[in-house]
Image (cartoon, helix red, strand yellow):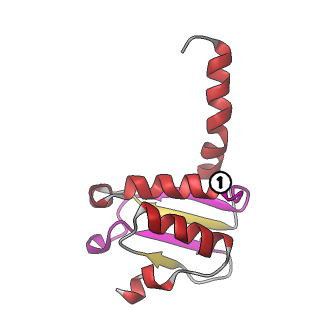
Amino acid sequence: MKSLAELAAIREKMKDKVAMREGSGQIRVVVGMATCGIAAGARPVLSAFVEGVGAAGLSEKVIVTQTGCIGICQYEPVVEIFEDGKDKVTYVKMTAEKAAEVVEKHLKGGNPVSEYTIGNK
């Protein structure tokens, strides 16, 4: 870092990503980040959700967060989506590409991607 202005620019750039993880939106995306999830590739999945939600302009409505063990290690990476007044949707064996599709179809469009859910595995 070379200057205070450069630090301020980095802070401003990251502000939305931090707010997206701490806010109180109507939809909560929870990525399992226990050892088994990380080993199965949960880090890129978490990043894809954070970036996808920001790019889609859903930061006010959607919170992306992480948790420890969800308890279904054989299906990692696991993502749970909680929406007010609706049943939880559990996505399994996620990838960054699948996460981008879930952002577009489920979070933005309102239609869960059933072929990635635990009920179809």
Instruction: Name the residue: 32% across, 60% down.
Output: 37
Instruction: Name the residue: 53% across, 58% down.
Output: 49
Is 108 rendered above or below residue 46?
A: below
Find disc 1 in the rendering and name its residue.
Answer: 55
Q: Residue 93: x and y, percent?
A: 35, 72
Name the quarter where the C terminus is drawn: bottom left
> For the residue marked with disc 1, what is the amino acid?
Ala
Q: Which residue of the protein is positioned furthest toward the top in this rendering?
A: 2
Q: Quadrant of residue 104?
A: bottom right
Is 113 rendered above or below residue 58?
A: below
Q: Quadrant of residue 116?
A: bottom left
Which span is picked out in magenta?
Answer: 54-83
Instruction: Name the residue: 37% across, 58% down.
Output: 42
Instruction: Name the residue: 32% across, 55% down.
Output: 38
Q: Residue 28: x and y, percent?
A: 60, 65
Answer whether residue 77 is magenta in the image: yes
Answer whether residue 86 is magenta in the image: no
Residue 77 placement, left or right of 64: left
Q: Residue 1: x and y, percent?
A: 54, 15
Mark 1 Cα within 10 Å, few/some/many (few <14, many 20+)? Answer: few
Residue 76 placement, left or right of 59: left
Q: Secondary structure at mark 1?
A: helix
Q: Residue 110: x and y, percent?
A: 66, 78
